[in-house]
Amino acid sequence: MFFEMQKYEINENVAHNLMLFLDRVELKGLKEIQAMNEIIECFNSPIESVDMTNDNKTTNK
């Protein structure tokens, strides 16, 4: 199945709530563990960061 790649902006509060939810999920198989690892990797390695002290310019990490 093919999905078109899209980008989403998630604020810190939503990211925190998502991590709280994922912490409660019971993993029941290797595919679920792989999915969880991919989700956590996304949170730990953002594509870009925003410098809020310099006119909100976006810089690549």
Image: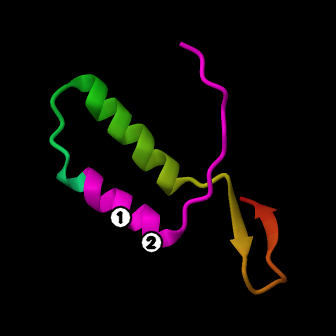
Residue drawn at 72 percent across, 70 percent down: 50
Q: Quadrant of residue 54?
A: bottom right
Residue at the spot of label 2 = 13
- Residue 22 is left or right of residue 53, and the answer is left
Residue at the spot of label 1 = 17
Which portion, as a residue range, is magenta?
1-22
Query: Magenta stretch: residue 4 in it?
Result: yes
Q: Secondary structure at mark 2?
A: helix
Q: Is residue 55 above or below residue 16?
A: below
At which x and y percent is residue 59? 79, 64
- Residue 21 is left or right of residue 14, and the answer is left
Q: Secondary structure at mark 1?
A: helix
Disc 2 to disc 1: CB gap under 8 Å: yes
Q: Nearer the viewer, residue 4 or 19?
A: 4
Q: Is residue 12 above or below residue 53?
A: above
The residues bearing labels 2 and 1 have C-alpha atoms spaced at a distance of 6 Å
